[in-house]
Image (tube, rainbow, N blue to C red):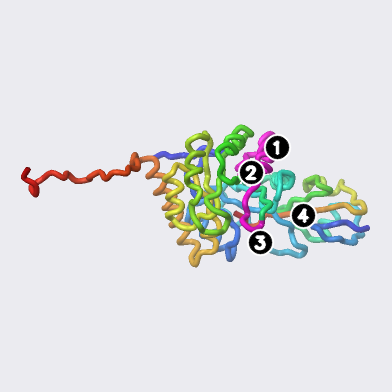
Amino acid sequence: MNDILKIGGKEITNRLFIGTGKFGDFGLMKQALEAAGAQVVTVALRRVNLGDKADNILEYIPENCTIMVNTSGARNCDEAVRIARLARGTDRGNWIKLEAIPDNKYLMPDNEETLKAVEILAKDGFMVFPYMNPDLVMARKMRDAGAAAIMPLGSPIGTNRGFRTQEIVRLIIKEIDLPVIVDAGLALPSHLAECMESGCAAVLVNTAIATAKDPVTLAKAFFLATQAGRLAYLSSANDVSDQARASSPLTGFLRQD
Amino acid sequence: MQVKLNGKPEDIKVSTLAELVKLKGFNCARVVIEHNLKIVSEEKLGEIRLNENDVIEVLAFIGGG
């Protein structure tokens, strides 16, 4: 099946996007990215410590991958825009996973500040992927402001609680003509499959893979689950019913009347 | 003079941003440098003369989700 995701001016066939934080080492991260066949990978920008001889993470990301730079650490629009522009200064940073998070306890994004940053960055030529608390009206505004996709959270970052926002995300998928990528809180293959079955264009996972006992095997499992969910979405026509519907004929030799 | 480098005050004796970057051993191929909130490309580092209280940020990619 030729199932291509056209997004941010690119064509993607692997709908599992992977974050690169929290891996024990870059070698392991590289193996996990390769096992999942990753095509879109997120990174962050941070101050370089003086005397820091750490490896360059980009050397461990397969060459065919598109880099999406997040604005993590930004608490508002201005900080997010500043980080995005710095990212572009590296010439790898035109795809921005836009985060504006003022809340340290639940890491909830500020949708208003995020929307302001979408407007600025989209006008400035960035491909903007806003991370948002799912809200249909706000998703519509972000689309109108020039977002390349909508990235609603599945549950709070790093919580491994799965696709808890499904009901609202389903509406966003139905109503917004942009790819919807569920990000955050996804920790099991079943979570990913659920997102994809609902019609999400892609999913983004970081913590669950990076902190797994065996990140390489789990990355592969996540890839398969993403694919399975996607294929089910494309091929299934099953609706939900209150009443039972027999899958075998109920008439037969047991009843003579 | 004193400048602020990555959030910390630094007493320096060099006069350009290029000299500071060289002195501190930053690898220009993998960092992005901001001087007083403006991004400076590698080839322009030598043109930036440093002044008292300048703010310099040197950033690089790390893992992130």
Q: Secondary structure at mark 4?
A: strand
Q: Does the magenta-highlighted stretch encompass residue A243?
A: no
Residue B42 location (% of width, % of height): 78, 48
Marks 2 and 4 sit apart, C-alpha to C-alpha, by 29 Å
The amino acid beneath tag 1 is Ile
* Residue highlighted by disc 2: A111
Sequence order check, earlier mark of 2 and 3: 3
Sequence order check, earlier mark of 1 and 2: 2
| Rendered residue at 60%/38% (across/down) | A138
Q: Classify residue B24 by image quadrant.
A: bottom right
* Residue highlighted by disc 4: B58
Q: Which numbered disc, 1 or 3, marks the residue closer to the eye?
A: 1
* Image side of residue A156 versus residue B1, left or right: left
* Residue highlighted by disc 1: A120
* Residue highlighted by disc 3: A55
Which residue is more in the foreground, A138 or A210? A138
Number of marks = 4
Residue A26 location (% of width, % of height): 59, 62
**Are labels 1 and 4 assigned to the same chain?**
no
Q: Which residues lie in the magenta part?
A: A104-130
Q: Which numbered disc, 1 or 2, marks the residue closer to the eye?
A: 2
The amino acid beneath tag 4 is Val
Sequence order check, earlier mark of 1 and 3: 3
**Are labels 1 and 2 assigned to the same chain?**
yes
The amino acid beneath tag 2 is Asn
| Rendered residue at 61%/37% (across/down) | A142
Q: Secondary structure at mark 1?
A: helix
